[in-house]
C-alpha cells in the first residue's frame, strides 16, 4: 500500500508548491507527476506551462485528465504526485454529461475509487492535491452545487484514507492528520 498524503486548501494557497517540495524530498529526481488539467484555452495553457516550469526537469509526467488511478498504477517511480483532484473530478462530470446529481456524484466517485484502488495496489508515496471549494461562494446552479458537494465527498474519502493531511492557508501548512 502506498503512503497517501493529501494536500488541500483554497486557490493559490501554496498546495502545489508544498506537494512538489514533499515529492522532491522523498523522490528527488525519481518522481512521476500525474497531471489532470487539459489546455482548453490560452489561460489554462499558461497555467499548465507554469506548473511544468516549476517542476524539476528530470521528473516524469503522465497526462491523465481521466483515469488517474490507472496512471498511478502505470507510474514507473515510487513517488507519485497527483495534481489535482479538483480538475480531475470536474472533467469527470463533463464527460458524464451529468444531467442529474446522482450521475455527477457517481462520475466523481469513480475517479476517487480509481485513486484509492491504485493506492492499495502499489507501494511507495502518493501525494494528492485537491481544493477546498466548500469555502467559496455558494454556486448559483445545480451543476455547481453537485460539483461542490461531490468534491467535498471526494476530499472526505481521500482524507479518511490518508496517512497525512496538510491544509495550506496563505502559503503556510497546517498538519491536520
Image (spheres, rainbow, N blue to C red):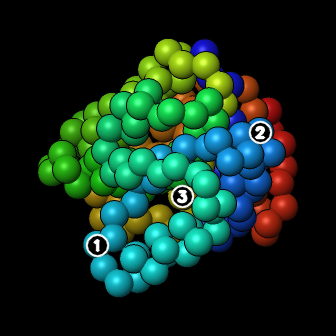
Q: Is residue 127 above or below residue 12?
A: above
Looking at marks 3 and 2 on the same chain, the residue that comes earlier in the sequence is marked by 2
The quadrant holding residue 142 is bottom left
Query: Which residue is tagged 3?
Result: 133
Quadrant (top left/top right/bottom left/bottom right) for the N terminus: top right
Quadrant (top left/top right/bottom left/bottom right) for the C terminus: top right
Question: Which residue is most to the bottom?
Answer: 42
3D distance between C-alphas at marks 1 and 2:
32 Å
User: Residue 123 or 162: which is nearer the viewer?
Assistant: 123
- Assess disc 3: are there few (<14), some (14-19) or many (≥20) residues with their C-alpha within 10 Å of its C-alpha: some
Query: Which residue is tagged 1?
Result: 40
Q: Can the viewer see residue 171? A: yes
Q: Position of residue 145 (x, y in %)?
A: 38, 55
> Which residue is rendered at x = 33% and y = 70% of the image?
39
Is 38 left or right of 124, judged from the image as shown? left
Secondary structure category for the residue under label 1? loop
Query: Which residue is tagged 2?
Result: 26
> Which residue is rendered at x = 28% and y = 38% of the image?
107
Looking at marks 1 and 2 on the same chain, the residue that comes earlier in the sequence is marked by 2
Amino acid at each position: 500500500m502506498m503512503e497517501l498524503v493529501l494536500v488541500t486548501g483554497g486557490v493559490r494557497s501554496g498546495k502545489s508548491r508544498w506537494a512538489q517540495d514533499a515529492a522532491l524530498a522523498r523522490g528527488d529526481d525519481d518522481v512521476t507527476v500525474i497531471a489532470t488539467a487539459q489546455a482548453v484555452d490560452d489561460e489554462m495553457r499558461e497555467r499548465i506551462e507554469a506548473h511544468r516550469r516549476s517542476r524539476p526537469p528530470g521528473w516524469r509526467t503522465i497526462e491523465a485528465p481521466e483515469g488517474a488511478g490507472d496512471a498511478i498504477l502505470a507510474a514507473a517511480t515510487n513517488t507519485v504526485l497527483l495534481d489535482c483532484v479538483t480538475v480531475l473530478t470536474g472533467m469527470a462530470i463533463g464527460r458524464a454529461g451529468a444531467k442529474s446529481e446522482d450521475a455527477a456524484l457517481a462520475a466523481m466517485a469513480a475517479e476517487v475509487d480509481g485513486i484509492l484502488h491504485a493506492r492499495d495496489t502499489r507501494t511507495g508515496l502518493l501525494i494528492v492535491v485537491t481544493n477546498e471549494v466548500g469555502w467559496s461562494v455558494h454556486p448559483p446552479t445545480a451543476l455547481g452545487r453537485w460539483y461542490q458537494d461531490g468534491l467535498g465527498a471526494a476530499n472526505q474519502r481521500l482524507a479518511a484514507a490518508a496517512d497525512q493531511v496538510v491544509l495550506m492557508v496563505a502559503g503556510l501548512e497546517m498538519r491536520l492528520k
